[in-house]
Amino acid sequence: MINIPICHRLPSRTFRIGKWYFPVCSRCTGIYLGIFSCYLLINIINVNYTFYLMFIAALVSAPTFVDATSQLLGFRESNNRLRFSTGLIAGFGLIILAKGIKLFLGIHWSLIN
């Protein structure tokens, strides 16, 4: 197994197709898919970045943190479906937060249109 520093990629926490494992765990797969999907969506529709939207974006990212932290501390064991779904929602929240911060601070960053 290749060690990827951006993800632990434990086989029990990674999706697989046949004998091939995804390059990142199910939570990271959800986050990356959410980021990609939201990026495409916000370039198609007009989004008004208000403080309220930024608050909601931060709020929808919280379940990923709670899921990961509660599992890390041993309070419970998560499953791949929950990891993926919370990651997917967090991906949307992270892009909205990044784009909103960019607009509020006037940062010119070519990756975030």
Image: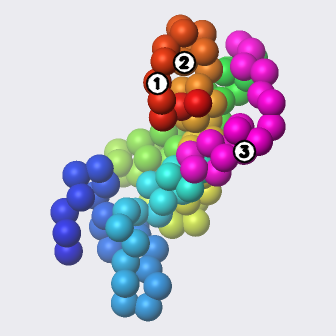
Query: Which is more toward the observer, 97 or 102?
Result: 102
Q: Residue furthest bottom?
A: 18
Quarter in which the C terminus is drawn: top right
Residue drawn at x 51%, y 66% is 80
Q: Please state which amino acid type lies under the numbered disc 3.
A: Leu
Mark 3 touches mark 1? (CB < 8 Å): no
Q: Nearer the viewer, mark 1 or mark 2?
A: 1
- Residue 39 located left or right of residue 44: left
Location of mark 1 (residue): 109
Q: What whole-number distance in Å separates the C-alpha atoms at marks 3 and 1?
A: 18 Å
- Residue 60: which quarter of the image? top right
Query: Which is more toward the observer, 85 or 68?
Result: 85
Q: Position of residue 5 (x, y in %)?
A: 22, 52
Give the structural element (helix, strand or loop) at label 2.
helix
Q: Position of residue 36 (x, y in %)?
A: 57, 50
Q: Please state which amino acid type lies under the numbered disc 1.
A: Trp
Location of mark 2 (residue): 102
Q: Position of residue 28 (x, y in %)?
A: 44, 55
The earlier-in-sequence mark between 2 and 3 is 3
Which class describes the residues within 10 Å of circle 1: few (<14), some (14-19), or many (20+)? few
The earlier-in-sequence mark between 1 and 2 is 2
Q: Is residue 86 magenta?
A: no
Write the start and end of the magenta stretch as one range: 35-51
Q: Residue furthest top?
A: 105
Location of mark 3 (residue): 41
Tell how many labels. 3
Does the image show residue 83? no
Quarter in which the N terminus is drawn: bottom left
Q: Is residue 48 above or below residue 94?
A: above
Mark 1 touches mark 2? (CB < 8 Å): yes
